[in-house]
Amino acid sequence: MLSYLLRRLAFMVPTILGITLMVFMLLALAPGGIGAGLAVSGGQMSDTSKVAQMQAYMEDRYGLNDPVIVQYVRWLGRISPVKFGMRDLRTPSGERVAPPREVDDPPLAGSFPPPAAPQVSFLPAAGEDAVPQFRSLQREAEGTRREYVGSVRLFRDALADWARAAGPEMAARLDAKGGARPASFEDVRFVPGDPACAGLAKAAADMHAKWLAARDAQARAMIAFRAEPYPKSGIPLVPGLVSLDTPDLGVSFSRNRPVADLILTALPVTLLINLIAFPISYLVAVPTGVLASVRRGGWFDVASGFLFLGLYSVPTVLAGVFAVGFLANQQYLGWFPVSGLHDSAADAMTFLPYTDAAGTWHRGYLLDTAWHVALPVLCLVYASFAVLSKQTRASMLDNFNADYVRTAKAKGVPRNDVVLRHVFRNSLLPLITMFVGIFPAMLAGSVVIERIFTVPGMGSLILEAIDLRDREIILANTFMVACVNLLALLLADILYAAADPRVSYE
Amino acid sequence: MSERAPASPAVPAAISGIDVMRGVGAVRAKGFWADAWERVLRRPGAVAGLCWISLVAFMAVFAPFIANAHPYTLVDAQGVRSWPLLANLSPSDWLLVAGAVAGVPWVFLGPSALRRSQRLGILVTAAIQAGLIVLLSSWAEGWLTGAARADAVKAFARGEWGPAAIAAGVALPVSVLAFLVPTVDGRAVRGAAAALVAAAAVLACAFAGGATLVNFEQYVEDERSGAIRDVTWAPVPWSPQYSRSDMVAVPPGTRVADWPKLSSYQGSAFGERRLLLGTDALGGDVLSQLLWACRLSISIGIVSTGISVVIGVTIGACMGYFGGKVDLLLFRVVEVFMAVPLLFLLIVAAGVLPRDTYVMMAIIGCFSWTGAARFTRAEFLKLRNQDFVQAARANGLPVSKILFRHMLPNGVTPVLVDASFAIAAAITVEATLSYLGLGPDGQASWGKLLSSATAATGTFVWWLAVFPGAAIFLSVLSYNLLGEAMRDAIDPKLRKAAH
């Protein structure tokens, strides 16, 4: 059993790699690429060079200017529990502090020789001063890096302007969008005194000054980081090289918050709806399936089959729109709340309902939640009735034909006992695996339902992330959903083996 | 012998053993598919479903003639009669009508030299061929008239013979491909079909109108002022792209002149029109959009399921036939697609890719093939050790022949039954994506209408939920009923139990 488990878990790794790579590639394929959503945030700035610098900073911060596959590997490195290289630090509040990033050399460094670099050496503060000093150095490193990255973008713009002015041969080296790739100008001899080069040389000097500042600030921040103002995060496996740590889901582009936080606030909402829906669908569908199989071909069998197939044919969207429109909207019945998970006054409510001294009845937190959740749950459960009751009916019918049932009947076992104790108990086995089929469907269905009823769950989170092209949230969601789904599959197989002694994975 | 025995003199009153050996009185057994089909037709639910699907298909083909804001015919101030509706039909409209009017009867009543399944195969190939020619030539025209092209190229593409030349250039390779599809063994038949379709498509692309932006209101104003007369309108005189800002959210059954903002049309022919199913949040007629959206509903289900069946059967056949490492590797690919709920993946893909009908068909097809692959794999695992497969292999047939000529016809049944449910699922997915605002742009769709029912803040427009909702529900239910009936018809376990 253990070896089976390990093999299954090992097979999950390529599956999760595959699905995340596919989603990553899909996002990269999209018009505008991965950073399309970021460009929007710079929209209100009128100065184009400011926008370009802002864009360059965003691209540098999230590593968007690297090839897609490099970005994917970097994402994997963050998500993987096994970390290589220098370990992160962790603040007392649980925030992760990564080491300050290396500053790249400026482009065309050979053509515009930089001034001599000063050596950085200082002793980091210890004790109480360590944290504020590290914080300010880190901020300085981040700020100078931002300036430097912006100046590189301006230098590239100046290079493109120069190339266009320098004639068709140079202009041909520009890429399709008219931007300059410094690597394609490596062989050009720039003469700093040449008036045609004046703008370019000025941009290069500015860039080099900012590079030095950024490099020195990085070096200082690194020294402070090495002094460990916070404890190290994770468990070392090979000191200095390999360590174990919790997966880092990244920081959302659009909300600027750790994705793990966003998911942790959204997940309980989705789980609440799904966990209420599950027992309901089993409680309705299994007895119906049993009754239908006992009177096979009777009116109940036909009617329940037709009704459930009809319900199965109602798309979730349709049910949601009808529920919101007719049951919740004040124009019509208005019995249920239209949106949200709680009343706006829910925080002040007691948990259980009560009647106060004046005789007015208060519904309390529990009933308020139930009232809000009723319609979303209704829309989530009805489609699974058909699948579940059909499966129950089929496996009951299979067992009715078995020899041991005939023996029981022949012995004179009462009919109810035959149905419930012999047939039904043996028919339960396939139902165990059924939830694996229903679970992903419900997970996906709740995406739609959360949009219709504006419930702040995982579905709302992912839809918002797609609108904003927020790569980190989409990927983290894919990762989470895939993990939950694959573990549910595995759990079903284990439960099946536990319930049925004939099944063995040895 | 029953009393209604055929009056054929060849059948004697009593049959001897010799007669049986000679085949006298033998009834030819029905084929597997004919038998299954007959069982399907015995189910009233399945027949009702077929009727609804046929109705939707009919509307899909003839929507331009039923719901159109161009009049059939009119006489202008100079006394010249013109036919605006016909002049504005697009190439695909013409081809659809031609295919439906000529092709469908040919399949059902055609020459006995070809079996009906062969005729159906030829019609399906022809439909794909014509669709590809129209689609690719419209893409090619867009590319050739793009901003980056030279002026001479643009002038040629926009010129009098430009569309015809482009369509002919596209039609040649597509028709060669269509000729190579092995629908029947006779090359003459395949060649004639491919050439006929190519000629029809090129003619349609060359001479059909459409694509020009029209001001539908001009007809109404001209009719009121008397500039045109003898106007004959289509039964539903609205087009899906015709919307008026003074006609937003009109309830069903309203007479145009009774709507306060349009009371100035009192007494004119336009004022006498009825908005049978009301208008949407942008002021477009709901009925005409419902009718035109039949096209998307029919095509998205069939095309996306077609793509998924082709991908799934190919991959599943390879897994089942080769087994071993191929199976292990490809099954990981299947698992990747199954690791995340399909709808989740489709939402991500539709969210980041362009909002286009063909892109949507492609992503639904490319992400939902795992079911077909698993069914085919299971069937092929059973088949690969059977004698006829061994014999084919011993004869040295190429692998593609063994897989698709010998094994596939014996193992395709579960996939085809599942396809009916897959079409239903594709329609649901389209409605869902359109509701979420991720549907195709510029195309009437039931899901889009449904989403506009709650779009206006606070108000719920019931006719925008009920009518498109009913259309979606009936279509999904029809395909599900049909699938259920087919599954029962071919399930040997159930059949045995029934006897």
Image: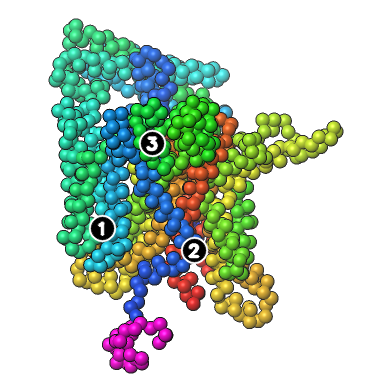
Residue annotated with mark 3 = B69
Q: Measure the C-alpha gap from mark 1 to mark 2.
A: 30 Å
Q: Is residue B11 magenta?
A: yes
**Chain of the residue under label 2:** B
Residue at 46 percent of width and 20 percent of height: A138
Magenta stretch containing residue B122, yes or no?
Answer: no
- Residue A477 disc label: none
Tell me which corner region of the image, top left, top right, bottom left or bottom right, holds residue A266. Answer: top right
Helix, strand or loop at disc 2?
helix
Magenta residues, as a range? Answer: B1-26
Q: Is residue B490 visible?
A: yes
**Residue under label 1:** B122
Q: Is residue B302 left or right of residue B466?
A: left
Task: List the residue tagged with mark 2.
Answer: B44
Q: Are marks 3 and 1 on the same chain?
A: yes
Q: Position of residue B223 (x, y in %)?
A: 38, 30
Outermost residue, right side: A357
CA neighbours of label 2 inside 10 A, class few (<14), some (14 to 19), many (20+): few
Marked residue chain, label 1: B
Residue type at mark 3: give it.
Answer: Ala
| Lower sequence index among marks 3 and 1 | 3
Q: Evaluate whether label 3 is on the same chain as label 2.
A: yes
Q: How many marks?
A: 3
The residues tagged by marks 3 and 2 sit, at their Cα atoms, a distance apart of 38 Å
Q: Quadrant of residue B228?
A: top left
- Disc 3 or disc 2, which is closer to the eye? 3
- Looking at marks 1 and 2 on the same chain, the residue that comes earlier in the sequence is marked by 2
Q: Is residue B482 above or below residue B462?
A: below
Name the amino acid, label 1: Ile
